[in-house]
Image: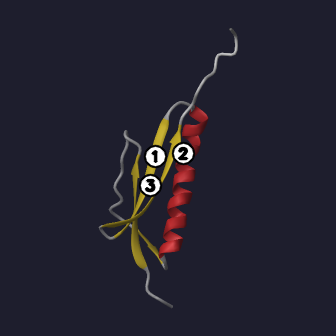
Amino acid sequence: MGTSDMYFFDLFDGANDKVDVVGTSFDDEDAARQAARSMLADRVRSEVLRGGEYLMTVRLRRNTMPIFSVTFALTEEHYRLDS
């Protein structure tokens, strides 16, 4: 069994930014990147249902070095159909 690295998931949404100080152990970087994608998908679900504009980024770090980020942007446009 190989060694596991510690990865940290920082969340940025412009209102409630959170820096991960605990970290999570993964066997490889691919698993950590997939976890970042999954975390973002889980977090933005309620925002999509709420509607409006929304931007969230999950930044993945190995120790202090950023190695990956994934961003979700929600924008809405309303069209007037009557003339």
Q: Which residue shows up at 58% across the image and 27% down it?
A: 77
Q: Where 2 sits versus 18, above or below? A: below
Identity, as a three-letter code, of the amino acid under mark 3 = Val
Residue 48 % position (x, y):
58, 38
Inter-mark Cα distance, 3 to 1 = 7 Å
SS at mark 3? strand
Look at label 2 and name its amino acid.
Val
The residue that mark 1 highlights is 56
Determine the residue positioned at 68% across, 8% down: 83
> Disc 3 versus disc 2: distance between alpha carbons?
11 Å
Relative horizontal placement of residue 52, taking residue 57 as reference (left or right): right
List x then y, in percent, for residue 46.
57, 40
In the picture, the disc for residue 40 is: none
Q: Residue furthest top?
A: 83
Crowd class of label 1 (few under 14; some 14 to 19; many from 20; radius 10 Å)? many
Q: Are marks 3 and 1 in contact (CB under 8 Å)?
A: yes
Please, what secondary structure does the residue beneath circle 1 have?
Answer: strand
Q: Position of residue 51 (x, y in %)?
A: 57, 31
For the residues labelled 2 and 1, say whether their Cβ atoms are less than 8 Å apart.
Answer: yes
Q: Which residue is mark 3?
A: 58
Residue at x 41%, y 78% (from the top left corner) = 5
The amino acid sitting under disc 1 is: Met
Q: Earlier in the sequence, mark 2 or mark 1?
A: 2
Labels 2, 1: front one: 1
Callout 2: few (<14), some (14-19), or many (20+) C-alpha neighbours within 10 Å? some
Quarter assignment of residue 76: top right
Residue located beneath label 2 in the image: 44
Q: Distance from label 2 to label 1 (Cα)?
A: 8 Å
Give the mark nearer the N terminus: 3 vs 2: 2
